[in-house]
Image (tube, rainbow, N blue to C red):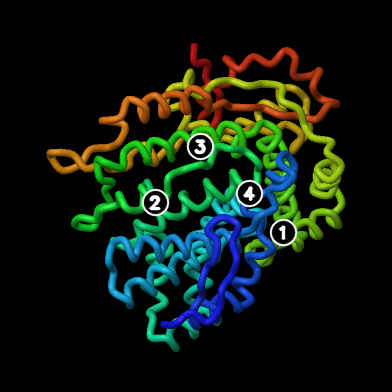
Amino acid sequence: MKPVKTIRDPIHGTITLNEIELELIDTPEFQRLRRIKQNGLCYLVYPAMNSTRFEHSLGVMYLAGRMAEHLELDNDNREILRVAALLHDIGHCAFSHTSDDILIKGGDSHEKNSSRIIMKSEISDILKNHGINPVEISGLANGEGNLGKIISSEIDIDKMDYLIRDSYYAGVAYGVIDLERIIYGVKMVDGEIFIKRGSIEAVESLLISRNLMYQTVYRHHTKRIVESMFRHAIDSLIKKGIVNYGEFIRMDDIDLIHALRNAGGYPGEIMNRIDNRRLFKTVFQGRMVSITENFRRDMAEKSMELEKKIAEDFGIDDGYLLLDIPGMKMPEFKILIESDNGSKFIDEISNLARALEKAEEEKLTLCIYTNTENREKMKEFNAERYIEFSQTRLRKFI
């Protein structure tokens, strides 16, 4: 299919679009991505981080085309891969990953939402009109099947784009990776994606960039505080019935900010605090590596109850003590590298990868935040009293 339009992108240069891609981009569902920030509230820390899911999706589509050329896919599979890459983030809700916890509470995910939109909107009709099966695109966009792993897996074009793009907009020098060498080092055998041994240094460079971006940008302490506050405000907005869940998943950033600013009560106050940068402060910070793996899982499952228990013990009103537990998944360290006996995970053959994995685990911290008025109450907080929370009680762990 011949290109009908070109777009200038600060990361990849000229991106060409053909007829079907242009039709998909012009749908209301895709245009909505112009109003969904790529990195949530990160712009409050890095002022230029105002990029959106719209340009990221275009970048991933571009890299899908590059990968298809390298793998010598036929024209039909090349187009299918580009379309799936273009639509892979169509289901993100307002402020992207900041609102993921709200989706999880609703038994949902942005991947499921993407599938709904692909299957039940104008997008489905456009795909069918061009002889493309929406079910196949939905699966590929969510990482299913052999080609889907190019879009979503341990090493994928999604990560390649956002690491470079986010570092560019943050104004940091951590996202410099050798895209050419990684792409041309990819090998697909029996549905598995491998990296050729000769490209291992380029992949190690990607892991270094990822590690630095997570430590300095994605997990910046102020970003974590403001996004914890924001999630609690959204949760309150829905619990109070000011916005129902169905309305929430259709909102863009502008809709959600407007709803919060006009909500009154707790959600309105929290939004006002964020608008005027009167943020909560950290009153406790502890390393996750010092907590047993079983308890990490228990804490994640019971975080709301644990948060409520601590607040009650210290006489703090609901919503004014926030427990922030980071995720522990690091799939990038399970990238498959070609070896003499088939393949091995990169952390099995790369000392650098092992060191980065260990360093990341050691830097993960559990944090507790509260407003200035309650900081004095938390001076006597002893984390050792609040370990291994169960349905009915807290048990001491030492």
Which amino acid, by three-letter code, is at mark 1? Answer: Asp
**Of helix, strand and loop, which one carries label 3?**
loop
Nearer-N-terminus badge (4/2): 4
Mark 2 to mark 3: distance in Å? 30 Å
Q: Which quadrant would residue 393 be assigned to in this image?
A: top right
Mark 1 to mark 4: distance in Å? 12 Å
Which amino acid, by three-letter code, is at mark 2? Answer: Glu
Task: Check contact, mark 1 vs mark 3: CB within 8 A.
Answer: no
Which residue position holds label 1? 253
Towards the viewer: 27 or 278: 27
Nearer to us of marks 4 and 3 is 4
Nearer-N-terminus badge (4/3): 4
Residue drawn at 76 percent across, 61 percent down? 254
Task: Check contact, mark 1 vs mark 2: CB within 8 A.
Answer: no
Mark 4 to mark 2: distance in Å? 25 Å
Which residue position holds label 4? 39
Residue drawn at 72 percent across, 28 percent down? 312
Vertical side of 164 occupied by 287: above or below: above
Vertical side of 358 occupied by 278: above or below: below
